[in-house]
Image (cartoon, coloured by chain):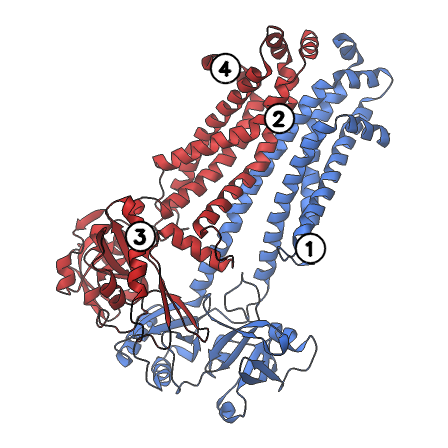
Chain colours: A red, B blue
Amino acid sequence: MLRHYFLISAKVFARRPFFTFVSLFGICLTLVVLTLVAAFLDHTFGAVAPEVHTDRMLGVFAVVLESEDGRHYQGEASYRLLDRELRELDGAELVSLASVPQSAATFVDGRKVPLRVRHVDGAFFQLLEFQVLEGRTLTDEDHVRAEPVAVINLETRRRLFGDGPAIDQSFDVDNQRLRVVGVVANVPSFRPISSSDVWAPVTSAPGEVDRRGLTGRFQAFILARTRQDLGPVAEDVEARFASVDISEADGYDRLEVRAETLFAAVCRRLMEILDEDEEGGPPPAERVRLILAVGALLFMALPALNLVNLNVSRILERAPEIGVRKSFGASSRALALQFLVENLMLTVVGGLLGFVLAALCLEAVSGSAVVSYAELSMNFRIFGWGLGLAVVFGLVSGVYPAWKMSRLHPKMALEEGAS
Amino acid sequence: MIRHALKLMWNRKHHNLLILCELMGAFLVLMILWIAGIAAHGRWQQPVGFEAENLWTLTGAGPEDAAPPAGTGQRLLAAAREHPQVEGAGLMYFPLYTQSGMRISNTEDGRFLLAEHIPASPGVGSVLGLELVEGRFFDERDRSGASPPVVINRALADRYFGRGAPVLDQTLRFGETSHRVLGVVETFRKGGELVLEEPVFFSPLWPDSELRFGLAALALRMRPGTDEAAQEELVMRLRAEMPSWNFDITRVADQRQHHLQERAAPLVAGAVVAVFLLAMVGLGLTGVLWQNISKRTQEIGLRRAQGATAADIRFQIGLELSVLTAVSIVLASVLAAQLPILGIVEVETSVALRAFVLSSAILILISAVCGLYPGWLAARIQPAQALHRQ
């Protein structure tokens, strides 16, 4: 039956190449744009190396401090605070503390090389799976012994050392002289957990570990043992910070800490910026998902309308076929289903084409310097998203014409066909 | 004639409604694109209020838990000025082309006005190349005033005192503090060319006072033709002065370019997508009209048989399409106008009007081009064809 539908629609599409081309053009365009958006989201939040365990990972991205006279701090925490509270968590396989990247300058032959430096502990490179190109990554031993060593990314290796050897070479960053022990692949700048140019043990930075106070520039990443542990771990973190003595925070009297996924944290931030942070409503992540879905549907509206128009205007072209089938007893439902399948087939073909075009676009973006270190590539998740979007688009644009076609009166259809 | 055409269209209203919706969608896409483009172009053409060429920014940050001792700013400025290529140096909080800043609100006497507060040392006025239209930038003479002096931009003056009202020596109250207005600059946009002008005020940051951690940046006016080597020399010199601090140095011209790229990228991407969308609408419309003509062979053939010329037929097709386009432009404009009326988005009227004119022109052009081939097909229909079909 389905095979039959496919054969018929292939014939129909081949009969009027102009219309098939116009339909495919619209479908492709829509799906290329949506697939690109999906790819970008996937590369920011999805399980792409080095962040391969995003499904089991929570982060303490910011702490919130509030005082009774209305002062408000929202930002990273100090190493000491996180180190004291988070090291022994039930249900956590690994806990790593890392600073947000800090910009620094180093000079090579009188030219400035701008660098971002992240100070990390020993667990960081166990939690994240970087692609090691030369040497090794940082270990617990480097951390404990406060070795002034560094892992750099490929781009930094090129800028600092050119084609010469990099391992065991030293360079100056700020007040530190660091010895390179490893080179890893570049990580796109929009991956907020892992991206940086230089990674060095936090213990090697003077005074960093013992810095007093609750605020600083550190975040914690927690890898739960299983996905089921995520909830209990998050609650455990909140409970621990609820009992923290905050007398050392100057004048603040309330500390709020959340362990959440990267996506949830970004959505919360976004909603705060948009000033939509109402209490009691659905969580920000849900609302952002809803906004994305509505946005995708809105974006589909014009191309779908275009496709509907084309299909509706071609109803009479199919009239003989419809008339014959109806007079032999085909139900409207069967006909509607057939036309819907036809439209779905077209959108899926358009989706596949769109997927290929989107891959080419990503290649172009990766090659250009629009986003630093953007190395976007396609994967099966994005492919799945593209296919899903194609089906949604096929349904949105196919239902009305299919319904309309199936209602064509057999008499009229046959008359029209006879002429 | 027109009534006749309208009647024909009304008889096919279901079908025309779909085309109408599509044209409306295309018009809305055009409006969004033009409004964003015209607004960005307008901002880009306006001066930013400072001279980015040969301007460098040197940022420094020290250990967080130890506030730098009083006079640190003085020492940093003196060290930077020692360099032979430095023409002038000033100290300010929040460097140029950054979004960070202090925004202070004025809720006194019921008015709510957000303004960006930029503490700056007396040298900053000449280093940035600020052009004052009234009054002057603060200097050492202003240390001993009853109320601290400020230099404000025109946007703040207009909103606080009202357009055309006297500004110099007036009192500006923000929160607890009363300031005396010492000077007015026409414009100052710290964020760069593609951000909106915000109310801004500069207050004095005396270099020998205490600095707040990590906020201060040195603005350096370099001699024309200074090469990059000076960057390392300056950083090394300042590191020697403050060994526990981290320094970074950037050319403002580079930041400017980065800013333009970053802000223009979404516009360019949006424009590319919109052009493809419009091409799709155009092709779709051609297809639909073409299909319609072949369905209307009898009707058109009959008209030809009754003596209508080919030109008449072309006119009819063109008229139908024009009416459809005009109606969709009107409906879409009414729809789009709801957004600013309901206060969901803010758009300047002049920008919206220009966007309207351009969008309408392009939509009319698209529909005219799309109607050409189907119109020509229709005009070729012979009475015999219509009879043959019967």
Which one is closest to the eye, mark 3 or mark 2? 3
Q: Residue at x 73, y 26 (%)?
A: B375
Residue A237 position within the rendered picture, expressed as x and y whole percent measured from the top left: 29, 58
- Residue A310 shows which numbered tag? 2
Callout 1 crowding tier (Cα within 10 Å): few <14, some 14–19, many ≥20: few
Where residue A58 is drawn, which disc sits there?
Answer: 3
Query: What percent of the width, then of the height, locates residue B282?
Result: 63, 33
**Residue beneath label 1, please?**
B341
Chain ID for label 4?
Answer: A
Q: Which mark is residue A5?
A: 4
> Of the residues tagged 2 and 4, which is closer to the observer?
4
Left or right, A94 with reference to B81: left
- Graded by Cα atoms within 10 Å as few (under 14), some (14 to 19) or many (20 or more), the crowding at tag 3 reads many
The image quarter in which residue B214 lies: bottom left
Q: Quadrant of the N terminus of chain B?
A: top right
Residue type highlighted by circle 1 = Ile
Label 3: which secondary element: strand
Chain letter for the residue marked with disc 3 in the picture? A
x then y, percent, for residue B99? 47, 65
Q: CA distance from mark 3 to mark 4?
A: 48 Å
- Residue nearer the viewer, B135 or A57: A57
B118 or B141: nearer the viewer: B118
Q: Which of label 1 and label 3 is nearer to you? A: 3
Q: Which circle's residue, 3 or 2, is located before the other in the chain?
A: 3
Mark 1 to mark 3 CA distance (whole Å): 43 Å
Q: CA distance from mark 1 to mark 2?
A: 35 Å
CA gap, disc 2 to disc 4?
A: 20 Å
Left/right placement of residue A368 relative to residue A149 reads right
Q: Is residue A415 left or right of residue A359?
A: right
> From what the image shows, is residue B209 above or below residue A189?
below
